[in-house]
Amino acid sequence: MIRINLLPYRATRKKENIRYQVNVFIGSLLLVGLGIFWYYSHLSGQIEDLNTEIKSTQEQVAKYKKINQEIAEIKKKLDVLARKIDVIESLELSRKLPVQHLDALYTLLIEKRMWYTKIEEKGANIEVYGVAIDNQTVADYMTRVEQSDRFSGVRLASGGIRKYVLKGSEGMSLKEFGVTFQPQPEQTKSSEADQK
C-alpha cells in the first residue's frame, strides 16, 4: 500500500497562506498609506491655495484701507473748501447787497416829487428818511416799496410838516417822512442765482 504524507503539503500551504495574508496586509497598508499621502497632498494644496487667497485678500484690504483714508482726507479737504466757498459767497453777497438795495431804492423814488435825505441799514431793517411834496407822495412811495419784490414790512417811522424856503419863492410846505422796512430773504437767494 502506498502511503502519501500530506503533512508537509499542509504546512507549506499554511505558510503560503500566511505569506499571502501578510502580503495582502502589507499591500493594504501601502494602499492606505498612498491614499493618506494623496489626501494629505490634496489638503496641503488646498491649504496653500487658501493661504495665498487670504494673503491676497489681506493685501487688497490694506490697499483699500489706504485708499479709503485718502478718500476721507479728500472729503475733509472738500468740506473745508466748500465752507470757504460759502463764506466767500456770503461775503460777496453782503458786499453787493447794499449796492443792490440802493439801486432798488433809487428805482422806487418818485421823481420830482420826493428826495432822500438819509438811508440807513440797522440790523435787519432799512430806514429811509426824506422829503416829499405831500402826503399822497409818501403814501404812493410806501405802496411802491410794499409792492416791490425786494422789500416787505413797510412802516411809517416818522412824519411831520416842515417849511422849507426855496430861492425865488416865498416858502413851501414839504412833508418830512421816515419809512422802515425789511429786505426780502428770498431776494438774497435769487440775486445769488442771477449772479451765477
Image: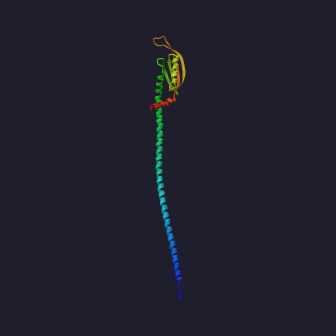
Which percent across, then down, holds residue 80? 47, 39
Q: Residue furthest front?
A: 1
Q: Residue furthest left?
A: 196
Residue found 48% across the figure and 34% down from its top: 87
Query: Is residue 156 shown above or below 22?
Result: above
Which percent across, then down, holds residue 65? 48, 48
Closer-to-camera residue (7/194): 7
Which percent across, then down, holds residue 99? 46, 26
Residue found 52% across the figure and 81% down from its top: 9
The quadrant of the rendering that contains the C terminus is top left
Query: Is residue 164 shown above or below 60?
Result: above
Colouring scheme, one of rainbow, by chain, secondary structure, one colour: rainbow
Query: Is residue 36 shown above or below 106?
Result: below
Q: How many marks?
A: 0
Which percent across, then down, holds residue 178? 52, 21
Q: Residue furthest top?
A: 170
Residue found 51% across the figure and 72% down from its top: 24
Closer-to-camera residue (57/126): 57
The quadrant of the rendering that contains the N terminus is bottom right
